[in-house]
Image: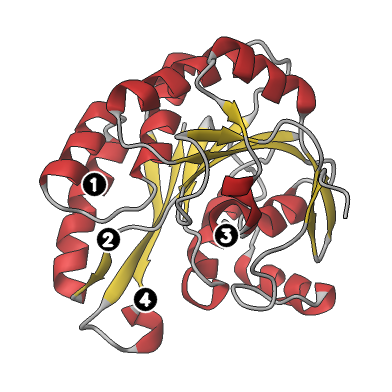
Amino acid sequence: MNTSIRMPAVAGRFYPANAEKLLQELEGFLTPDPSPIRAFGCVAPHAGYVYSGSIAGAVYSRIAVPRCCVVLCPNHTGLGPPLSIMSSGDWHTPLGSVPIDEELATELKTRLPQLTEDRDAHRAEHAIEVQLPFLEVRQRFLKFVPIVLGTSRFELLEALGIALAEVCGTRDERPLIVASSDMNHYESDAITRRKDQMAIDRVLALDARGLHDVVMNEDISMCGFGPATAMITAAKNLGATQAELVEYATSGDVSGDRDRVVGYAGIVVL
C-alpha cells in the first residue's frame, strides 16, 4: 500500500462506509446558510454521527468553507510525538480523496520546528477523519492540513496558534482552522452541562489561556481543549473579535441515558 494514502479508519462505525448512505446522512445534517459567514475557526464535535452529526452539521452549515482547512484534533491513540503533522499525500473517504496542502504544511513546519512529520498518530485517529465528509460536501476543491495534538502544555499550544496565524495570514484565501473536539465525558448530564458551560464561556470570550486553565483546574474532560486553545490563539492573531455558540447537546439527548453522557458543542469564531 502506498504510504502517502491514508485510508479511512472508522468508516462503517462512526459514519456510513457507503458513499450514497453517507451523503444521505450529511444532507440531513446540513442546511447551508444562504449567506454563510467567513469564519476564522470553529469547534466541531467528532463522535459518531448518530450522536454529534447534527451539531457538526450546524457548524458547517453556518460557515463558508474555503479551499484549504487546517484540522486540529486531540490524540486519542497515544501514538506519535506531541505535535504530529502529515505534510503530503491524500486521505481517502467514502466520498473520494482529499489532498493535503503540501505548501501550507511545509510552511507550518518551517515556522514551528516542534511540528513533527509523523503518520502513526494519524493512522487510527478518528477525530480528523469524521470532519472530512462535512468539509468535502461544503467545499468540492478541498485541501487540508491534519495536525494531531498530544500535549496539554499551554506554551506549545500557544506557539502553534501563533504559527498558524503567521502562515494562514499570508494566504489570499485564509484557511479555516477547525478544532475537532467533544466536551466533557462520562459524567451525568447535569454535571456535564455545568462543566461544559464553563469551557464554552471561555471559548466565546476568545480566552485561550482561560480555556486551558478552566479545563485543567475544574477537571473538565474536553478532549480537544488543546486544539481549541491553538485555534483561538490563531484566530485572535488573525483579527477575530467574537465567537458564536451554534448548537449544544449531550449524548443523552439521543440515547436517553442521562447518567453517563458526552457533551458536544458547535462554535464558530468570527
> Where is residue 64 shown, x and y percent of the image?
66, 40
Q: Which numbered disc covers residue 126?
A: 3
Decide which of 86, 15 is in the foreground and name it. 86
| Residue under the image location 31 percent in, 37 percent down | 152
Between discs 4 and 1, the one toward the N terminus: 1
The amino acid type found where label 4 is placed reads: Ser
Q: Residues within 10 Å of mark 1 (few under 14, many from 20)?
A: many
| Residue extending furthest toward the bottom | 256
Q: Residue 109: horizontal and vertical position, in percent?
A: 61, 18
Whole-Å distance between the Cαs marked 3 and 2? 18 Å
Disc 4 vs disc 1: Cβ atoms closer than 8 Å?
no
Return the residue at label 2: 184
* Dot 2 and dot 1 residues touching (CB under 8 Å): yes
The residue under label 2 is which amino acid type? Asn
Say whether residue 1 is left or right of residue 173: right
Q: Earlier in the sequence, mark 3 or mark 2?
A: 3
C-alpha distance separating marks 1 and 3: 23 Å
Left or right of 102 in this view: 85 = left
User: Does dot 1 land on a helix, a strand or a loop?
Assistant: helix
* Residue type, label 3: His
What's the mark number on residue 199? 1
Q: Can residue 78 be spotted in the picture? A: yes
How many neighbours does mark 4 have within 10 angstroms: few (below 14), some (14-19), or many (20 or more)? Answer: many
Q: Residue at x 35, y 68 (%)?
A: 249
Q: Residues within 10 Å of mark 2 (few under 14, many from 20)?
A: many
Instruction: Name which quarter of the figure residue 8 lies in.
Output: bottom right
Cα distance in 3D space between marks 4 and 2: 11 Å
Residue designated by label 4:
251
Horizontal and vertical percent position of residue 60: 60, 52
- Going from N to C along the chain, the mark reached first, 1 or 3, is 3
